[in-house]
């Protein structure tokens, strides 16, 4: 693929600091995406609880690929948002969006008639007042019953929480793994092995666990700073990608985890990784103190990734990024990105540099 160029179509002031963007994968709602925010509100007085200092807002937008129009359709006032994920592969009529927040909660919302309605909520540890729920992942597995799903949530005390969800019973904690000595920044299900999960922490460790026994499979020490994001590739078996505060994108073969297959310095510390939904072997990376980057993966595991595009529209911490899953007649690529202190959301079109307009 040729080098990529970016055309900014929309810029939005989110008012609160923006840290996550998630495009809806539901077949009938692929024009929609959500943006989550995290605002630290300075309060006066000694008796005000820390938890009420963090507030957030979730925006729901609709983007039309034909007219390239962007419309805000809903906004939700909530606790500060740390991460969000839509359920992929669901069979229900309406999309489900899971959100983790600064109250140490997992909340599940249903999108219906352009409104996000909370349908279930779970506090990870009611006895811990200062717990933050940091990241989450849905289980994408055909082996689970159609009406039952699992969600993985990492937290600021280093734990990874396995949570069951059934519409009739709501959210229920199934197990807790103490995985890290400091913040567990990220967690992920293995897309190919239903019994394996991964976590990354501020203790510089990448861990893997077997859910049948909650026993550790391995501990990887390849990173030089905290492990901040994980991507078990949904289209390429045995491929695990990681991001770290040490600014390197790493590729691992999950059958042999002693050392990475390849590394690529993207700069700025990598907070989020998303593989494109159109099987083009592209990875979108949010590089916190640098930019948003697009990396091309080679067809084989033995060849390293190549940087083919850099988006410099944002001037603050680059946290949230995702691909548009809706395809227009021209097969164009679109993405949404957001940054923190400048509370900025962008929607951009991505093209090859020599493509004729």
Image (cartoon, rainbow, N blue to C red):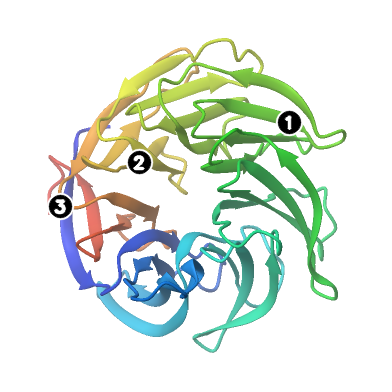
The residue singled out by tag 1 in the image is: 209
Q: Which mark is residue 146?
A: none
Find the residue positioned furthest to the front. 46
In which quadrant is the C terminus drawn? bottom left
Find the residue positioned furthest to the bottom. 113
Identify the residue at image location x=24%, y=63%. Answer: 346
Task: Say which of 163 and 52 sits in front.
Answer: 52
Q: Position of residue 98 (x, y in %)?
A: 59, 65
Point out the frontmost of discs 2 and 1: 1
In which quadrant is the N terminus drawn? top left
Identify the residue at image location x=60%, y=62%. Answer: 129
**To which quarter of the image does residue 36 belong?**
bottom left
**Secondary structure category for the residue under label 2:** strand
Q: Is residue 240 visible?
A: yes
Identify the residue at image location x=27%, y=73%. Answer: 14
Mark 3 surroundings within 10 Å by alpha-carbon count, few (fewer than 14), some (14 through 19), many (20 or more): some
Task: Say which of 247 and 145 sits in front.
Answer: 247
Indicate left or right for 31 with 105 as reference: left
Q: Position of residue 233 (x, y in %)?
A: 55, 36
Indicate left or right for 354 with 16 as reference: left
Task: Say which of 197 and 124 sits in front.
Answer: 124
N-terminal-most mark, 3 or 1 = 1
N-terminal-most mark, 2 or 1 = 1
Give yes or no for contact between labels 3 and 1 (Cβ–Cβ under 8 Å): no
The residue singled out by tag 2 in the image is: 285
The residue singled out by tag 3 in the image is: 315
**To which quarter of the image does residue 172 belong?**
bottom right
Alpha-carbon span between mark 3 and mark 2: 16 Å
Mark 1 surroundings within 10 Å by alpha-carbon count, few (fewer than 14), some (14 through 19), many (20 or more): many
**Secondary structure category for the residue under label 3:** loop
Q: Position of residue 65 (x, y in %)?
A: 31, 69
Alpha-carbon span between mark 3 and mark 1: 38 Å
């Amino acid at each position: 693929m040729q080098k990529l160029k970016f055309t900014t179509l929309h810029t939005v002031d989110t008012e609160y600091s923006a840290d996550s963007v998630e495009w809806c994968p539901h077949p009938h709602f692929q024009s929609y995406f959500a943006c989550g925010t995290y605002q630290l509100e300075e309060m006066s007085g000694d008796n005000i609880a820390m938890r009420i200092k963090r507030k957030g807002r979730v925006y729901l937008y609709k983007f039309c690929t034909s007219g390239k129009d962007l419309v805000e359709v809903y906004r939700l006032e909530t606790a500060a948002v740390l991460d969000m994920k839509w359920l992929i592969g669901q069979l229900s009529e309406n999309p489900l969006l899971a959100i983790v927040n600064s109250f140490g909660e997992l909340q599940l919302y249903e999108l219906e008639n352009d409104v996000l309605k909370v349908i279930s909520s779970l506090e990870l540890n009611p006895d811990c007042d200062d717990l933050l729920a940091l990241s989450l992942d849905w289980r994408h597995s055909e082996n689970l019953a159609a009406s039952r799903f699992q969600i993985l949530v990492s937290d600021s005390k280093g734990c990874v929480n396995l949570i069951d969800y059934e519409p009739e019973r709501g959210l229920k904690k199934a197990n807790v793994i103490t995985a890290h000595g400091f913040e567990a920044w990220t967690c992920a299900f293995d897309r190919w092995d239903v019994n394996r999960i991964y976590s990354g922490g501020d203790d510089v460790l990448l861990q893997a666990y077997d859910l049948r026994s909650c026993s550790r499979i391995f501990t990887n020490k390849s990173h030089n700073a905290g492990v901040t994001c994980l991507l078990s590739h949904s289209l390429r078996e045995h491929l695990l990608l990681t991001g770290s505060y040490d600014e390197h994108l790493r590729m691992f073969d999950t059958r042999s985890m002693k050392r990475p297959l390849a590394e690529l310095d993207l700069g700025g510390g990598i907070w989020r990784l998303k593989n494109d939904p159109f099987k083009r072997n592209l990875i979108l990376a949010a590089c916190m103190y640098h930019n948003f980057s697009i990396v091309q993966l080679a067809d084989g595991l033995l060849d390293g990734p190549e940087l083919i595009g850099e988006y410099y529209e944002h001037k603050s911490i680059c946290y949230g990024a995702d691909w548009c899953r809706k395809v227009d007649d021209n097969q164009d690529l679109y993405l949404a990105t957001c940054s923190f202190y400048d509370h900025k959301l962008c929607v951009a079109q991505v093209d090859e540099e020599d493509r004729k307009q």
